[in-house]
Amino acid sequence: MNGLPQTNFQPEDAINPVVRLAALASEDMGAVETLITERMDSQRSPLIPSVAQHLVNAGGKRIRPLITVAAARMLGYDGSGHHALAAAVEFIHSATLLHDDVVDDSQLRRGKAPANQVYGNAHSVLVGDFLFARSFILMVDAGSMQALHVLSRAAAVIAEGEVRQLEAVRDIDLSREAYLGIIEAKTAALFAAAAQVSPILSGAGPEMEHALETYGRELGLAFQLVDDALDYGGLAADLGKNVGDDFREGKMTLPLVLAVGEADDEERAFWTRVITEPNGQQDEDLEAAVAILKRRGALDATLAAARAHAANAVEALNAAPKNVWSDSLAALAEFVVERAY
Amino acid sequence: MNGLPQTNFQPEDAINPVVRLAALASEDMGAVETLITERMDSQRSPLIPSVAQHLVNAGGKRIRPLITVAAARMLGYDGSGHHALAAAVEFIHSATLLHDDVVDDSQLRRGKAPANQVYGNAHSVLVGDFLFARSFILMVDAGSMQALHVLSRAAAVIAEGEVRQLEAVRDIDLSREAYLGIIEAKTAALFAAAAQVSPILSGAGPEMEHALETYGRELGLAFQLVDDALDYGGLAADLGKNVGDDFREGKMTLPLVLAVGEADDEERAFWTRVITEPNGQQDEDLEAAVAILKRRGALDATLAAARAHAANAVEALNAAPKNVWSDSLAALAEFVVERAY
């Protein structure tokens, strides 16, 4: 608090680059939303769109499709294939979220789930499969076999990354390098593909493809690292709602990897108990964990890594045309990190 | 027993058309197996191929890829795209089986699963996703956007059919028509696509595509109806292992649909208890159910329906060239029904 009078006005509303980019791309994004709504419909099962809607409409910021649309516009693309690909990217993302519910819940619940939640698992799996399949129909509509290849490869890599992450649960000796490999696969690969398909569609050539793939991947890494820090309350270490999920699941993320690397004997004993032992945690351990993370500068270091990746994303845009769209993409990369403060 | 001396020789080994077709197509199927092994490999996670292998190698008869290969050969196709598409079809099938484990288990276990089985759910979901994504990369390799469209549409339809089936669990008033709609989606759509992609690849024209799509769909319907009858022991009503799964899950299949339609008051009360009530079954109920099914001729009628669909499949081949491959495809359709006796 700096003594200024408090108002309800949130300065970040005015400058939030996601909002600004969505406004700039409102015509394109309207077309993308129409496609999303149309293609999640099912004549055979009215239940599918209601399950899918629950997720697809759930306040998602549509960051990935925004990147596809903005990259296409930046390159002067004037067809409509970017709408189908942007919707396809969002469907892959939504399918992944639906399946993550099953994957993560199965670790948390340990068989204690009530029947209705278990029944929900079946729907999460099947509606995820439906959206995934429909994403490929959208790609067919866009008509680019090369874009299809990039997105199907990304989908396979995401699954690989998630399996690797499962294997790394409770592994306190996970290296920084191995961890970055996991998030490059499970998170950054889809951002990279979302950005890369637009130069493919525009026929902008391999150099531009490489530049935008790099932009997407680096932005995706920054995005995930910020998420990792926020799960421990971010730099403010604000332990409000929605924090501590990774910790409770014994999920290794960069803050933990860094803190374990710096741990003294006492801290090492603490991490061993709370992370490697399935029932080793007590209520107060999250607070103790955050205290160690701060003492060891692990949240600072994680956010510094995020900033570096965001800077790489911005730098990759140097190879791209300079216009309002590339400016927006650069602002987006910077914003991804700012939200942690 | 007709008094002849018994030997270990099983006459069906010699005439089994799946075995005969696999021998006829051994060169093609060798190439398909190589692709299957290569493409389930993962540099990022060695765990993936071991989970996938468990399923993909688990004594599958490869009926779907056999259909793709035989249809391509029947039409004189001399490229190699049919190998990639056949492998893609098997991957979609395997992904569906992996996800079905989660979907079906979640109904059966009702939260009683031990942790290792729940952990297994996560892997089933993710390895299924991996195979599904890899199937699309295989389709890209085959290079036909139209084949890709047919297979991605089939994948979406399968998910729709499975959701419809979930909704129909414990619904004893499910109509025969609605049930056939469900299995056309969840089972027959992939057989139809497996057969249809070959005329697409061969450029054989829409009429041949229609003929083979019909062949595949009708064979798929026959296949599922035979499975339905076998789950109650088939015509022999042999209640050995592996029967009664559908019954225990309250899953409506054609034998039940037909028997409920003919039920007197007492039988209706029985079906209401054992099917609609989640915990309504006792150990002896499966035997009682089979007795009613036989009394009402429901297993006979189900197999008669299967025979009719198999005959439709054979008839659809009239539009195709007459050669050793079309003969094998016809024999395959007939065999699918014979295995119930």
Image (cartoon, coloured by chain):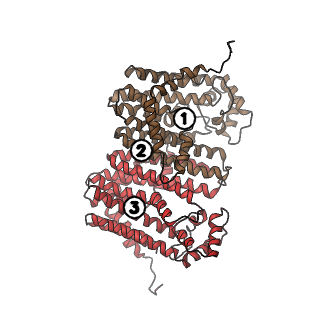
Chain colours: A brown, B red
Q: CA distance from mark 2 to mark 3?
A: 22 Å
Extreme residue toward the bottom, this view: B3
Residue depicted at 51% across the width and 70% down the height: B230
User: What secondary structure is found at the residue carrying circle 1?
Assistant: loop
Q: Which residue is mark 3?
A: B217
Q: Residue shown at 52%/41% (left/top)?
A: A94
Name the residue located 44 percent from the left edge and 71 percent from the top edge: B305
Whether discs 1 and 3 lie on one chain: the answer is no
> What residue is disc 1 on?
A60
Helix, strand or loop at mark 3: helix
Q: Determine the chain carrying the residue at label 3.
A: B
Q: Does A111 appear above or below A153?
A: below
Q: Which quadrant holds residue A275?
A: top right
- SS at mark 2 in the image: helix
Three-letter code for the amino acid on which mark 3 is drawn: Arg
**Can you name the residue that lies furthest to the top here?**
A3
Disc 2 with disc 3 on a shared chain: no
Q: Position of residue B70 (x, y in %)?
A: 32, 60
**Where is A33 relative to B136, above or below?**
above
Residue type marked 2? Phe
- The residue lying toward the viewer, choosing from B261 and B45, is B261
Going by the image, does B138 lie left or right of A167? Answer: left
Asked if residue B153 is positioned above or below residue B302 in the image, the reply reads: above
Of labels 2 and 1, the one closer to you: 1
x and y percentages locating residue B224 in the rendered image: 46, 65
Q: Which residue is mark 2?
A: A136
Residue B225 image offset from top left, x and y in percent:
47, 67
Q: Chain of mark 2?
A: A
- Viewer-proximal residue, A218 or B337? B337
User: Is residue B167 or residue B201 the one in the foreground?
Assistant: B167
The image position of residue A236, as x and y in percent, is 66, 23
